[in-house]
C-alpha cells in the first residue's frame, strides 16, 4: 500500500509462481509483494518459507528486499528475518538486516528498545492477549534475539523513520529493510527513481453507482475488530458482514468456513466492493475465489489498503483489507465514508475510470 500510494506499480502475489507471468514495464517502478503465511508458524518453518519467497523474488528480478513484519512483532519474526538473510546472502554475502517495526501514524513506536502501542508496552494491550500469536513482552532484545547481522533501531516519529530509510538506502542493496508500513512509506519515497505516471486512486476503481453493495468478511477474533463492526453496522446497516463464531476455535478451521461462505455469496450475487478483515481469513478467501493476487491501488485510510482482485471468480472487483487489530473504533465507518466520497467525486466530474489491471473486468456480472 505504501509503495502504491507513491506511484509504484504494486502487485500482491498470493503464490510465488505468479511472479513468473506478471507483466513488468521497465519504465515503471515495480513492486512485487509475496505473502508467506508464516506468522503463526514455528521459526524454523517461517525461515524456510521466507527464504523460498526471497529466492523467487530474486528470480523475478528484485534488486532490493523489504521484509514486511507485523508492527507489534506477533509471530515468527526471528525466523522470517533469518530466512530472508539466508536467501539474500546467496547474492550479497555481506547481507544484514535493519529492523524497525515502528508505525507512528498507527501508534506503534520503539523507544529505548521497547515496543509500544499508543505509549503502552505492547504486552499490556490487546496484542498481548492475541488468540493466535500473543506478544508477551515489549523488550525487542527478547522479541528478536541479537545477532551480529541484525540491527534493531528506535523510532517515535515519521522523521525518525525517514532518517532510518536514508541510512538503509545509502548502505546499498545488501541491507534488508525489516519493518511495518511506517518504514515502507519512507523507503517508497527514497527508492522511487521515477515520478508517478497515471497512478490509479480510489476514485478510479470504486464503482460509480449511487448505492454500492458491499460484502465484508471478518475472520479476526480480536476485540478491536468486533468493536469496529458494531460501529459499522450502526452507521451503515446495509453492509453485509460475515462474522466468525464468538467462541475461540481452531483459527484455520474458522477461516476456511468463512471463506467458503464468502465465496458462495460472491458466486450467487453481484457485489461492488469486497472487504476482508483478518489476515488468515483474507488469504483463505482469496484462495477459494481462485485469485492469484491483488493489484494494490490506494489506501482508504492509513493502514487499510484498497486494490482490485486479480484472477479468479472476483477478478477486477475492488477489495480492501484490514488487519484484525488495526485501527480506531470508527475505522470501518471511515472506510465506507471514503468509498462514498470517492464515488461521488468520480460521478461529479464525469471522468472515465482509469485503465484497470490486465485481465480485470470490473465488478462481476451475474452469469
Image (cartoon, helix red, strand yellow):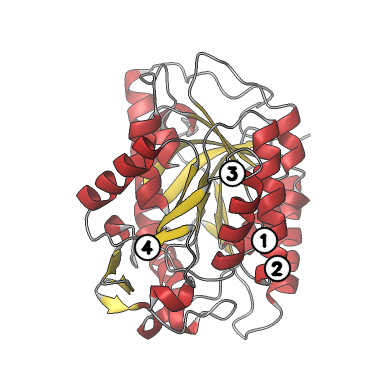
Marker disc for residue 361: none
Badge 3 vs badge 2, beta-carbon distance below 8 Å: no
Front: mark 4 or 2 = 2
**What residue sits right under mark 1 in the picture?**
47
Callout 2 environment at 10 Å: few (<14), some (14 to 19), or many (20+)? some
Expressed as whole percent of the image width and height from the top left, the position of residue 80 reads 60, 60
Q: Residue at x 46, y 46 (%)?
A: 305
Residue drawn at point x = 48 percent, y = 24 percent: 29
Q: CA distance from mark 4 to mark 2?
A: 31 Å
Could you tell which of marks 4 and 2 lies nearer the N-terminus?
A: 2
Q: In the rendered view of the protein, which quadrant contains the N terminus?
A: top left
* Residue 129, placed above or below residue 208: below
Q: CA distance from mark 2 to mark 1?
A: 5 Å
> Element type at marker 1?
helix
Q: Secondary structure at mark 4?
A: loop
- Residue located beneath label 4 in the image: 327
- The residue that mark 3 highlights is 93
Disc 2: which residue: 44
Query: In screen coordinates, is 105 left or right of 228?
Result: left
> Which is closer to the viewer, label 3 or label 4?
3
- Report, in whole angstroms, how far the alpha carbon at label 3 lies from the one at label 4: 39 Å
Identify the residue shown where x is 45% and y is 82%. 128
Amino acid at each position: 500500500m505504501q509503495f502504491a500510494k507513491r506511484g509504484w506499480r504494486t502487485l500482491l502475489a498470493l503464490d510465488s509462481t505468479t511472479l513468473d507471468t506478471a507483466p513488468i514495464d521497465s519504465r515503471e517502478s515495480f513492486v512485487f509483494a509475496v505473502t508467506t503465511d508464516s506468522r503463526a508458524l514455528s521459526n524454523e518453518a517461517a525461515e524456510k518459507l521466507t527464504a523460498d519467497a526471497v529466492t523467487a523474488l530474486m528470480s523475478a528480478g528484485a534488486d532490493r528486499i523489504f521484509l514486511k513484519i507485523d508492527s507489534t512483532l506477533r509471530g515468527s519474526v526471528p525466523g522470517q528475518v533469518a530466512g530472508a538473510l539466508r536467501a539474500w546472502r546467496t547474492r550479497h554475502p555481506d547481507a544484514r538486516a535493519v529492523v524497525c517495526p515502528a508505525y507512528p501514524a498507527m501508534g506503534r513506536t520503539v523507544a529505548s528498545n521497547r515496543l509500544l502501542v499508543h505509549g503502552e508496552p505492547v504486552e499490556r494491550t490487546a496484542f498481548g492477549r492475541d488468540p493466535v500469536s500473543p506478544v508477551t513482552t515489549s523488550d525487542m532484545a527478547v522479541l528478536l534475539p541479537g545477532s551480529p547481522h541484525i540491527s534493531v533501531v528506535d523510532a517515535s516519529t515519521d522523521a525518525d523513520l525517514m532518517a532510518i530509510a536514508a541510512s538503509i538506502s545509502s548502505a546499498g542493496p545488501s541491507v534488508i529493510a525489516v519493518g511495518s508500513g511506517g518504514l515502507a512509506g519512507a523507503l517508497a519515497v527514497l527508492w522511487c527513481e521515477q515520478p508517478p505516471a497515471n497512478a490509479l486512486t480510489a476514485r478510479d476503481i470504486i464503482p460509480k453507482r449511487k448505492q454500492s453493495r458491499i460484502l465484508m468478511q471478518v475472520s479476526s477474533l480480536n476485540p478491536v475488530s468486533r468493536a469496529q463492526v458494531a460501529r459499522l453496522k450502526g452507521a451503515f446497516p446495509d453492509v453485509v458482514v460475515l462474522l466468525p463464531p464468538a467462541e475461540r476455535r481452531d483459527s484455520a478451521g474458522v477461516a476456511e468456513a468463512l471463506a467458503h461462505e464468502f465465496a458462495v455469496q460472491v458466486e450467487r450475487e453481484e457485489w461492488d466492493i469486497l472487504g476482508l478483515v483478518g489476515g488468515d481469513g483474507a488469504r483463505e478467501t482469496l484462495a477459494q475465489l481462485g485469485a492469484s493476487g491483488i493489484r494494490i491501488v490506494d489506501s482508504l485510510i492509513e493502514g487499510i489498503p484498497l486494490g482490485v482482485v486479480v484472477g479468479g471468480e472476483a477478478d477486477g472487483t475492488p477489495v480492501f483489507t484490514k488487519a484484525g487489530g488495526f485501527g480506531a473504533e470508527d475505522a470501518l465507518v471511515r472506510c465506507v465514508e471514503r468509498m462514498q466520497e470517492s464515488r461521488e467525486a468520480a460521478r461529479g466530474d464525469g471522468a472515465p475510470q482509469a485503465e484497470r489491471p490486465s485481465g480485470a473486468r470490473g465488478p462481476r456480472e451475474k452469469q
